Image (cartoon, grey):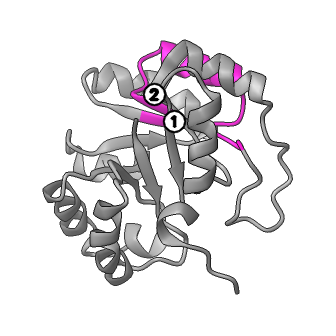
Amino acid sequence: MKLIAITPDYLTVEDLISFFRLLEENGASHLYVRSPFILNSSRLKDVLLQLLNRNIIPVIPYEKWLEFENPAFICHFKEHEKNKIKDFREKYPEQAFSFSAHGISLVEQVLENGAAFVFLSPVFPPYSKKDYNLKPLSFEEISYIVDRFGEKVVLLGGIDFERLKELKLRLVKDFSVAGITMFFGRKDF
């Protein structure tokens, strides 16, 4: 099981560094860096290497991955970037990549085409998005895709450690989870 932390949008490099120990203690295997403050920092590469030294694999957006082309970092594509995957795979056939999806058929498609894992959301209404309008997936949909692809399916949306326990009890096969709140807490503005 992968436990993937996702940086909240407001997180800075200094904030992230202060969370390193907590990420390790809570078992984060990966960190999807999506905060613009971190992604646009001159210290980005250094902080990604620090994560690797702590055995936390960085996942970074496609455009940022191209800046480094470091095979230790996982390249992440959003749904609207799906058309870029084919060229990416041709140029970097051995490079691990991930993807974000909101539908079962898209998850199947991308996993069948070599994604290391796919974020599937929403599983529950997200804590971090107040006006989120996507309806959570049904348990039948989640169960089907997890049974088919196991831990390559990363469940996202409203995940915390209590809901993780619930999912472990209900799902037969292994799966992975990702979250903002479960690793960085809630921040009300």
Residue at image position (39%, 28%) is 116
Q: CA distance from mark 1 to mark 2?
A: 14 Å
Query: What range is drawn magenta here?
Result: 98-123
The amino acid sitting under disc 1 is Phe
Which residue bears the numbered disc 1?
99
Residue at image position (24%, 23%) is 94
Of mark 1 and mark 2, the one earlier in the sequence is 1
What mark, if any, has residue 151 been given in the picture?
2
Q: Position of residue 121 (x, y in %)?
A: 67, 41
Label 2 sits on a secondary structure element that is helix
Q: Quadrant of residue 73?
A: top left
Q: Residues within 10 Å of mark 2 (few under 14, many from 20)?
A: some
Residue at image position (58%, 15%) is 147
Residue at image position (32%, 48%) is 29
Q: Is residue 108 magenta?
A: yes
The residue sitting at the bottom extreme is 189
